[in-house]
Amino acid sequence: MSSVTPQDTVKNATTYASLVRPYSQSPKPVWGLASLFFTSLLVPPRPEIPPLLLRACFGAIFTGAGHVLSCGDARNGSGITTAWSLTYLLINLRKSLTPPRHPVSLALSGATLASAAIYGTEYFVLQKDEERQ
């Protein structure tokens, strides 16, 4: 049976932070998500895809969150991105996973889930670690 020392925990957290932090403080992932939402506007309305207005609004919100991150405000930018990503998932995840599925709906939900994971880690985990130190 192996025992985990506090030094091992700190080392693992530091390694994890060094992997996630370049992405979680960069506006590029959220701008990629925004461009996916805007590109999805080319797909005509269908019952299994979120409405056009919803896709346009979330694209605009994620563009704004990317702007906040590009100004160097990682705390608020990651918070905005996390909150709106979770809001989108709350509204659309179940609908995108139940048949009939559509690739656009699955892509939007998958990319939004990835965004929530990246920026949520920054907001809820990594910044809290900085405050403790």
Image (spheres, helix red, strand yellow):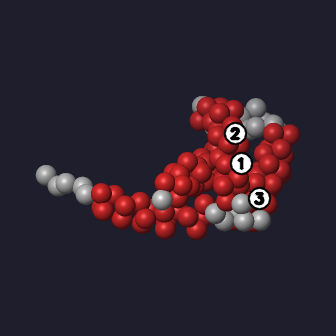
Closer to the camera, 4 or 97? 4
Rendered view: 72 above or below 115: below
- Residue that badge 3 annotates: 68
The kind of residue tagged 1 is: Ile
Return the residue found at the far left: 1
Q: Secondary structure under badge 3? A: helix
Label for residue 80?
Answer: 1
- Residue that badge 2 annotates: 88
The kind of residue tagged 2 is: Tyr
The kind of residue tagged 3 is: Val
Label 1 near label 3: C-beta < 8 Å?
Answer: yes
Q: Residue at x 30, y 57 (%)?
A: 6
Rendered view: 93 above or below 19: above
Closer to the camera, 89 or 2? 2
Q: Can you tell which of label 1 and label 2 is closer to the viewer?
A: 1
Q: Secondary structure under badge 1? A: helix
Closer to the camera, 37 or 72? 72
Rendered view: 52 above or below 47: below
Point out the tag, 2 or 3, that comes first from the N-terminus. 3
Is residue 133 among what the camera can see? yes
**Whole-percent x, y for residue 82 in the image:** 65, 47
Closer to the camera, 31 or 119? 119
Rendered view: 87 above or below 120: above
